[in-house]
Structure formats: structure tokens, C-alpha cells
Image (cartoon, grey):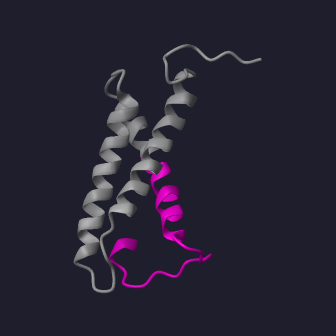
């Protein structure tokens, strides 16, 4: 698990580059959370519930990192995790249901 490692090499370094990696890591998690939930429920709030569960995982991951030598917990990392989870949830919902966020069917022009 990446969060257990003390020093992670980054392919590209720029200020706050780790936030980009957090978002990219949580997009698939948000997508898969909504997919899994959609198999058992038809809730209208599926996108938010899936993103929230992925966000909670991000919170627990940051708590875990607090106890790993050489790592620290960051509220900005949690926000990046939540943003990635929401993007992934939105992508699944858009692909699966073909609706915009107001619930109307999207039209292809």
C-alpha cells in the first residue's frame, strides 16, 4: 500500500504535485464506489453517497499516514481525495444514466 511507505518517488515534481496524484488516485475509487452501490440500490443520491464513502476512505488513509514515519496527514490531501472521488462518481453517473446533474436527459447534437 502506497500510504505505508515513508518516501514515494514522484515522476514529476512541482508545487503541490501530490494533490494531482491524490485526485487521479481517487477518480477510479469514486467511479467504482458508485458502480458497486448502483448494483444494490437506485437512490437518486447515488453520486454523493459513493463520493462520500470514497472520501471517508481518504480520511482514514490520512489518519493512517499520521502514524507512518516520514509521512504526514494533510487536510489538503483529504480535499484532493474528495475532489477525485466526486469526479469519478460524476463520470460513472454521466456514463451510466446519461443525465446531467439536474436530472434531465442529455441530448446529443
Residue 1 shows in this picture: no
Extreme residue in the right direction: 109
Choose between 63 and 38: the one closer to the eye: 63
Q: Where is residue 28 in the image (x, y as percent from the top left)?
A: 49, 49
Q: Position of residue 13 (x, y in %)?
A: 59, 77
Q: Position of residue 62 (x, y in %)?
A: 29, 66
Residue 57 shows in this picture: yes
* Quarter occupied by residue 38: top left
In the displayed structure image, the side of residue 107 where residue 73 appears, left or right: left
Q: What residue is drawn where x is 46% and y is 38%?
A: 89
- In the rendered image, residue 7 lying in the magenta stretch gets the answer yes
Quarter of the image with the N terminus is bottom left
Extreme residue in the front direction: 15
- Relative height, residue 44 to residue 29 (above, below): above
Q: Where is residue 3 in the image (x, y as percent from the top left)?
A: 36, 72
Choose between 79 and 11: the one closer to the eye: 79
In the displayed structure image, the side of residue 21 where residue 60 appears, left or right: left
- In the rendered image, residue 13 lying in the magenta stretch gets the answer yes
- Relative height, residue 22 to residue 4 (above, below): above
- Relative height, residue 22 to residue 1 (above, below): above
Q: How many marks?
A: 0
* Quarter occupied by residue 100: top right
Q: What residue is drawn where x is 49% and y is 19%?
A: 102
- Relative height, residue 106 to residue 94 (above, below): above
What residue range appears in magenta?
Answer: 1-29
Quarter of the image with the C terminus is top right
Amino acid at each position: 500500500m502506497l500510504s505505508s511507505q515513508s518516501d514515494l518517488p514522484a515522476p514529476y515534481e512541482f508545487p503541490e504535485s501530490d494533490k494531482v496524484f491524490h485526485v487521479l488516485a481517487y477518480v477510479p475509487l469514486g467511479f467504482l464506489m458508485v458502480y458497486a452501490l448502483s448494483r444494490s440500490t437506485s437512490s437518486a443520491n447515488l453520486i454523493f453517497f459513493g463520493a462520500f464513502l470514497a472520501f471517508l476512505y481518504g480520511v482514514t488513509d490520512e489518519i493512517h499516514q499520521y502514524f507512518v514515519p516520514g509521512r504526514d496527514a494533510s487536510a489538503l490531501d483529504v480535499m484532493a481525495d474528495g475532489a477525485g472521488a466526486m469526479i469519478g462518481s460524476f463520470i460513472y453517473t454521466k456514463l451510466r444514466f446519461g443525465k446531467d446533474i439536474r436530472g434531465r436527459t442529455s441530448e446529443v447534437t
